[in-house]
Amino acid sequence: MKQFLMVTTLAALVMVGAVYAQQPAGHTVPKAQPNTDVTPAAPTGEMALGAVRITRRVKANGETLAPGTYQLRLTGDQAKPDANGQTPQLERWVEFRQGNQVRAKEVVSIVPASDVSKVQKDPPPRPGSYKVEMLRGNDYVRVWINRGGNHFLIYLPPA
């Protein structure tokens, strides 16, 4: 019985070796990798993003925003905690203001114009403008601002 088991195991190993011997050797030179040390240009410090009109009730960081026009201001505060793969200066907080009052804050993703086609399928707003739209499934309202060579994306759940 032991001999049979040993012969069967040895035969199986020989067959596996034969299968691997028939496989092509693969690449001998590694593929070129993108330079991940280059950080895309992002605005530093605070920046006015302009006024946007929101037509339905939404939540921003737990605060309910009523329909209306809000001035958006990018803060210098980076979103925490850090997420895997996140470029810290590209995930920041934006304030929704009416008059001199901050009504709510939410995280904004900053996407350089050169990369926007990699993360969004929809056509972007014209430079210097914005669009607010309900996404498929009515799960989120997206505020998309195109300003200064960057795209600012904010996702707000309906209230």
Image (tube, rainbow, N blue to C red):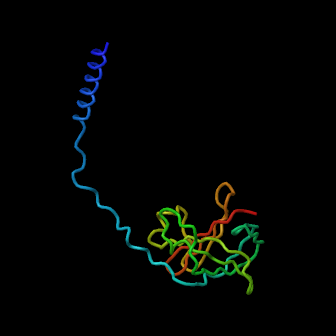
The quadrant the N terminus occupies is top left
Residue 130 x/y as whole percent: 61, 75
Residue 145 x/y as whole percent: 59, 74
In the rendered view, does 19 fall on the left or right side of 75?
Answer: left
Whether 35 is drawn above or below 101: the answer is above
Outermost residue to the bottom: 100
Residue 45 x/y as whole percent: 55, 84
The residue at the point 23 percent across, 41 percent down is 24
Residue 90 x/y as whole percent: 51, 73
In the rendered view, does 100 fall on the left or right side of 150?
Answer: right
The quadrant the C terminus occupies is bottom right
Q: Nearer the viewer, residue 42 or 88?
A: 88
The residue at the point 67 percent across, 64 percent down is 141
The residue at the point 74 percent across, 70 percent down is 63
Whether 145 is drawn above or below 118: the answer is below
Whether 6 is drawn above or below 157: the answer is above
Outermost residue to the front: 2
Which quadrant of the view contains residue 7? Answer: top left
In the rendered view, does 78 fall on the left or right side of 58?
Answer: left
Outermost residue to the top: 1
